[in-house]
Image (cartoon, rainbow, N blue to C red):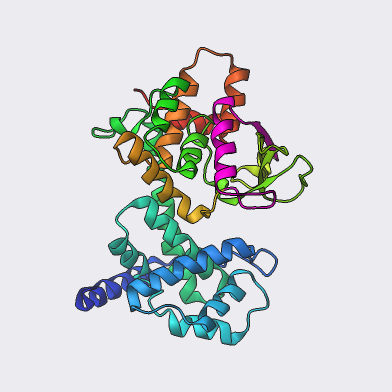
Amino acid sequence: MINKVLYNKEYQKKLREIKASNITFKSYHNADTKGVNHKTATQYIAKMDNIHRKLQNISLTPETKHSLYMILTNTSPTISDYRRIRKELKYINLFFVNLMKLMYTNANSLKSNLIPYMTLTSYIDKSYYKKVNHLINLETQTINKNYINDKNDNTIKEGDINKYITDFSPETLHANMQKLTDNLDKVIYGIYTFQKARRLEYGNMYITYDTYDKNIKTNYVIINDANEPSFFYFNDYKTQKTYGGQLIPINDNLKEYIKNYIISYNLKVGDKFIKYNENYMSSVIKNIFKKVYNADITLNYIRRSHATCINNLPISNNERLKLVLEMGHSPSESLLYRKLI
C-alpha cells in the first residue's frame, strides 16, 4: 500500500522541480509518426491493465482498454478517448516514475513497464503529459546507460558464476535432457542450447512445409511429411529490419527431440510451434533451466553464455559472424555480451 502522505509530499516536490527547470517540453510525434501496430498495442494494454490492478485493485474497463487501443494505434481517437484516459488513469502524473520505482525494483522490469506509458504520453498533445513523458524518458535513458555500462564490464559479478553455462557439448546437453520429462520442455531447452540462443521469437513460430511465404512477418519451423524438421525461418525478430529473413539450419542433435514433440503433442502444419506467447516464454525458459542447472538462469544469461562461447572459439571472423547472426545479434552487441569466465 502506498503511503499517501509521502506520495503527496514527493509529488509536490517534483512539481516544484519541473516548474523551476525552465525546460521547453516539445511533442515527440505528429499525426504521421504516431501509432504502434496491433501486436504492440495489445501487449502494452496488457501491461497497463496489470499495473492498474496493482494500483487500483480493479482491471481497466473495456471502454478504457478500447480508448487506449485507439490512441496507441492512432486509429482516429476521439476527444472522449483522451478524456477517459485522463479520468481513469489519474496516477499518470509527475510522480508516476517514482511510483513505478516503488513497484518495480528491478531496472529491466521497471523499463519494460514504463515503455507503454512513455509511448502513450508522447501521443497525447497536452503540456502536462509532455512533462510526464520527459520524466519517463529520463528514467529509461538512465536505465539504458547503466545497462550498457554493465555490459561493457565483462567480468562476472560475485554470485552469478553459476548462472553461466560453460559446456555446450552435445554429450552434456543430451545428458541434461534426461532431467526433463516433458517433450515440450526438452524442445525449449534444446532450442536455447543446441541452437545459438535467440530472443523470444519462438513464441511467434508456426509449423510449415517448405512452401511458406517469406514475406509474411512471422517465424516458421520447416518440416517434411514425416514430421522431420530441417530449418527455422525467422522474419519477426528485433533486428529483422537490419538482417532480413533468416533461414537457420536445425542442429542435428535437436531434430529428434522436435520430431518426438510434434508427434506426441499431435501437432500439424499451421499449428503454433510452441504454445506459449513471447510474454510468457521468459518465465517458462527460466523454470526449465532451473530444473536442469538448479540455478536462476534467465534468457539473458543463456545468451551471454552463448556469446562468450562464440567469442572464445578459435575460428575465423567470418565463421564467428555467422554464429553471431544466428542469435539475431550484431557483432558489436555480441562483444558486449561476452564475459570472462
Q: Nearer the viewer, residue 176 or 76?
A: 176
Residue 290 sits inside the magenta stretch = no
Quadrant location of the C terminus in the rendered image = top left
Spot occupied by residue 254 in the image (x, y as percentages of width and height): 55, 31
Residue 263, quarter of the rendered image:
top right
Residue 7, quarter of the rendered image:
bottom left
Residue 146, quarter of the rendered image:
top left
Q: Residue at x 57, y 21 (%)?
A: 320
Depicted 126 relative to depicted 327: above or below: below
Spot occupied by residue 17 in the image (x, y as percentages of width and height): 33, 68
242 sits left or right of 167 in the view:
right
Q: Nearer the viewer, residue 332 or 339?
A: 339
Depicted 81 relative to depicted 178: above or below: below
Residue 25 visible, this orientation: no
Q: Which residues are magenta?
A: 245-273
Spot occupied by residue 249 in the image (x, y as percentages of width and height): 65, 30
Q: Residue at x 37, y 57 (%)?
A: 110
Q: Residue at x 39, y 30 (%)?
A: 176
Spot occupied by residue 68 in the image (x, y as percentages of width and height): 55, 75
Residue 289 visible, this orientation: yes
